[in-house]
Amino acid sequence: MPLIKKILVLAFFLSLTAVKVYADEWENTTAEDMGISQEEFQKVKESGMSKSKFLKLLEVGISPNEYFSEPWKKLGVTEDHWLAEKKAGMADDDIDRSYRKQDANNLTPFISFVLPGYYEYKTNKTYLGLGLSTAAVAGIALTFAVQNSETHSIYPEFPILTLVAMLTSAGDAFLGTRYVDNQEAGRFSWNLGLNGNGGPAAALSLHF
């Protein structure tokens, strides 16, 4: 028997063995046993997911529909990272804030200073990013293209324009990454209560 034919026969038997093992794994298991719908149960089996992995998902409260929607992609993290955080009891919003807070430790503010508009483009603030990058480039171009004919020096307004764009973009990146977990930052709220004399009193609260 030629070598290629032997390999094909071996592969065939291995595939049959794998199918049998998978079938045995789910044998005598029903959707009711797992506490999920028949549709979810069918989806799990069709995906080829092992029973052990499925049980681990159920242990941390992850339903098949939630898992197969691949929420980790929307959050910008890996599947393993998402599963680990879910196991720790974190909700998707908490995972998102935690990940973006960690992102504050990287060079995003610095990159946004060197390349104004970088953070804004990255966070879909397209018009703001376009405005900042345009202002920065225009300031640099005008600094070298237009000079004071009397003093033969540059106009300080142009480099200042570039600097303002750089600082604005870097500041936006700094605040956006470091304070994303403080959704109430910078908001004003009025607290209406009673003063010591039993009358109404309004107090202004500023959250930092």
Image (tube, helix red, strand yellow):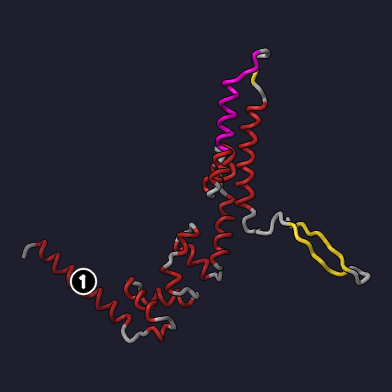
Asked whether 74 or 55 is in front, the reply is 74
The location of residue 43, given as percent across then percent down, is 36, 74
One can see residue 111 in this view: no
In the figure, 80 relative to 153: above or below? below
Residue pictured at 81% horizontal, 59% vertical:
204
**Residue 141, magenta (yes or no):** yes
Tell me the residue that label 1 is attached to. 14
202 relative to 18 in the view: left or right: right
Residue pictured at 52% horizontal, 66% vertical:
85
Residue pictured at 58% horizontal, 28% vertical:
140
**Which residues are drawn in magenta?**
132-149
One can see residue 58 in this view: yes
9 relative to 126 in the view: left or right: left
Under mark 1, the amino acid is Leu
- State the SS at label 1: helix
Answer with the quarter of the image where residue 146 lies.
top right
**Residue 186, magenta (yes or no):** no
In the figure, 84 relative to 108: above or below? below
Answer with the quarter of the image where residue 6 lies.
bottom left
Q: Quadrant of the C terminus?
A: bottom right
Give the main secondary structure of the magenta stretch.
Answer: helix
Asked whether 170 or 129 is in front, the reply is 129
